[in-house]
Amino acid sequence: YTMTWSGQYEYMERAKAKMQLVVPATLALVFLLLYFNFRNVSETLIVMLSIPFTLVGGVWLLWGLDYDWSVAVTIGFLALAGVAAETGVVMLVYLDHAWAARKRAGASGAADLHAAVIEGAVERVRPKMMTVASTMLGLLPILWGTGTGASVMKRIAAPMIGGMVS
């Protein structure tokens, strides 16, 4: 006699094995693209640092909705990482521009750097909030959907909405 697990369990095991390759490869690709853009490891790491902060919100919303980990959830987190990197790039570009303008004016101290960070961040708060709000408003109908395929789409949208909140 033999007993083997099959069906849904077998599909999940195959998907888990593929995701163990796809997720790190995707994050490495995002890192490489950011590096090619900035030509600087420190700026690339600053942008990549925004990703864990968004993941926290996604995990909390998944916990609140009582969703189990699945391939759809993983895809939602990968999409969230892309959006987090995008908003991080835009913020960093504005911070760099503010610092470059201050340096042209003769600034060089820590107080000048602090002022440049405040100036660059203030310029991006409203556009960033508009981006986050429009993304969340676009995903809320998917999260509340009940039609065909809604169970999968909810699990893609949930990490993104939770991550946008955090």
Image (cartoon, rainbow, N blue to C red):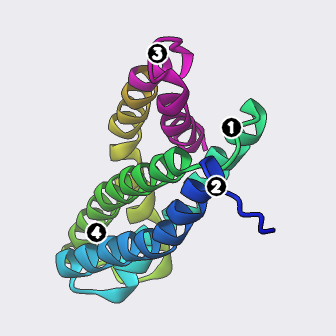
Where is residue 132 shown, x and y percent of the image? 42, 35
User: What whole-number distance in Å separates the C-alpha atoms at marks 2 and 4?
Assistant: 54 Å
Looking at the image, is mark 2 or mark 4 earlier in the sequence? 2
Could you say which disc has been placed on residue 141 in the image?
Answer: 3
Tell me the amino acid under the disc marked 2.
Answer: Ser
Q: CB of mark 4 within 8 Å of CB of mark 3?
A: no
Instruction: Give whichever of discs 4 and 3 has the lower sequence position.
Output: 4
CA gap between label 1 and label 4 equals 33 Å
Image height check: is 62 above or below 18? Answer: above
Q: What element does badge 4 sit on?
A: helix
Q: Earlier in the sequence, mark 2 or mark 3?
A: 2
Kindly identify which residue carries mark 1. 61
Q: Amino acid at mark 4?
A: Asp
Q: Earlier in the sequence, mark 1 or mark 4?
A: 1
Q: Quadrant of residue 29?
A: bottom left
- Residue 151 falls within the magenta-colored stretch: yes
